[in-house]
Image: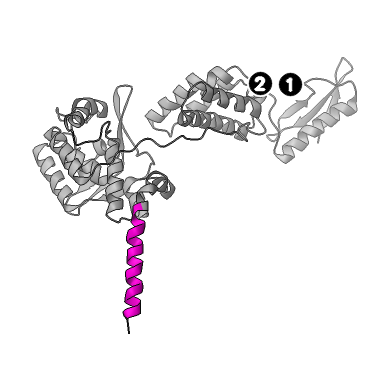
Amino acid sequence: MAWTRRLPSGRYQGLYRDAAGRVRRASESEGGGTYLRQGDAKAAAEDQESKIRRGVWVDPELRRIVFEDYARKWLETKGNVRPRTRINVEGRLRNHVLPAFGDVLIRAIEPADVRGWVTGLSAGGLAPSTVKATYRTFSQIMRTAEVDRLIVRSPCIGIELPAEESHEEMRFLDPEQVAVLADNISDRYRAAIFTAAYTGLRAGELWALKLARTNLLARRLEVVESLSEVRGALVTGPTKTRNRRTVTLPSFLAEIIGQHVGRYPSRDGRVFTAAEGGPVRHHKFYLRHFRPAVQAVAELPEGLRFHDLRHTCAAICIAQGMDVKAIQQRLGHASIRTTLDRYGHLFAGHDAEVLERLDRLAAEGEEAP
């Protein structure tokens, strides 16, 4: 129940208890002002009690926090992200978020401020994907501030983000081109090329693959972790979607991997290793082995990237009639929508084949007694 007290000055102060039972001062201004009339002081305190009951009360002391201070504390709590993701988040904060909102009171940020900021990012030449990722980081911070009751509602509402102009250009190899690439790269990485093209493993998943996770007799492997380089150090962590999956192997690939393991034994249990026997640093592999091999073979598409072997796997599977759910599981996409968004256009060529099958079924039905 709200109450008041009279100060030596003769003015009144409204008092109430917050949800934790602490006595609070109600005021017209932050910090605890006073009122000339007792009724005004009590009304202010009752208003705060009403906000507590409705779940929209905000601690006046916390409302004085500036965005930068809260953002840094928020970042300290992000212990469940991969090291590479943390570096990306830190970069977005440092380069794009803090320059705009760093010294602003977090409660003072309005939707109009956010709209203007997003517009400025796009006008400054940032790619739509970068603008979206930066906004997502900012939005997460403001949503957490709402949960922590620093603000009543996040200002990230009704914000229009730039549309993606197009997906990255994909390059697909046919099986003959995969074999040509594998035969023109260092023999140590020949099996890795075939594995990437026929399993769809991401580079980090490929280099993290352990012998203990590989069953060549059953022709399958378990994808459970990923290897990445963070500030010069190699870090093993979960896969991109944090899910483990089983990928089956065609017989020829199981045989190629078996021969590779026999020729290049590993000292740390990995299937694929660098020349010294240790883990593969993808950046060095790309510069020293993959790119020179691509440039040396005229039959390969110009600008072919290692990630295009993952696209190649999707294209080969689609061409062989694998259904989209199986392809999603093979590639480790978080949802089937991701698979369809990226590779849906490759299914279009199957319409004629499906129609031909329907015609045959209809004709067989008419001929049946």
- At horizontal 17% and vertical 37% (from top left) the residue drawn is 181
- At horizontal 16% and vertical 42% (from top left) the residue drawn is 179
First in sequence, mark 1 or 2: give its number.
1
Q: Residues within 10 Å of mark 2 (few under 14, many from 20)?
A: some
Asked whether, in this view, residue 40 is left or right of residue 302, the answer is: right
Give the quarter of the figure containing the C terminus. Answer: bottom left
The kind of secondary structure element at disc 2 is helix
Residue 359 in magenta stretch = yes
Q: Is residue 151 above or below residue 245?
A: above
Q: Residues within 10 Å of mark 1 (few under 14, many from 20)?
A: few
Task: Using the image, tell me which numbered label, if any, was put on residue 30.
Answer: 1
- At horizontal 59% and vertical 22% (from top left) the residue drawn is 67
Q: Amino acid at mark 1?
A: Glu
Residue 189 found in image quarter? top left
Q: Is residue 364 above or below residue 242?
A: below
Give the quarter of the figure containing the N terminus. Answer: top right
Asked whether, in this view, residue 95 is left or right of residue 175, the answer is: right
Return the residue at label 2: 64
Q: Which residues are magenta?
A: 349-367
- In x, y percent, where is residue 201? 28, 42
- In x, y percent, where is residue 363? 33, 74
Q: Nearer the viewer, residue 86 or 130?
A: 130
Q: CA distance from mark 1 to mark 2?
A: 8 Å
Q: Nearer the viewer, residue 239 or 161?
A: 161
Q: Is residue 244 above or below residue 72?
A: below
- At horizontal 77% and vertical 31% (from top left) the residue drawn is 16
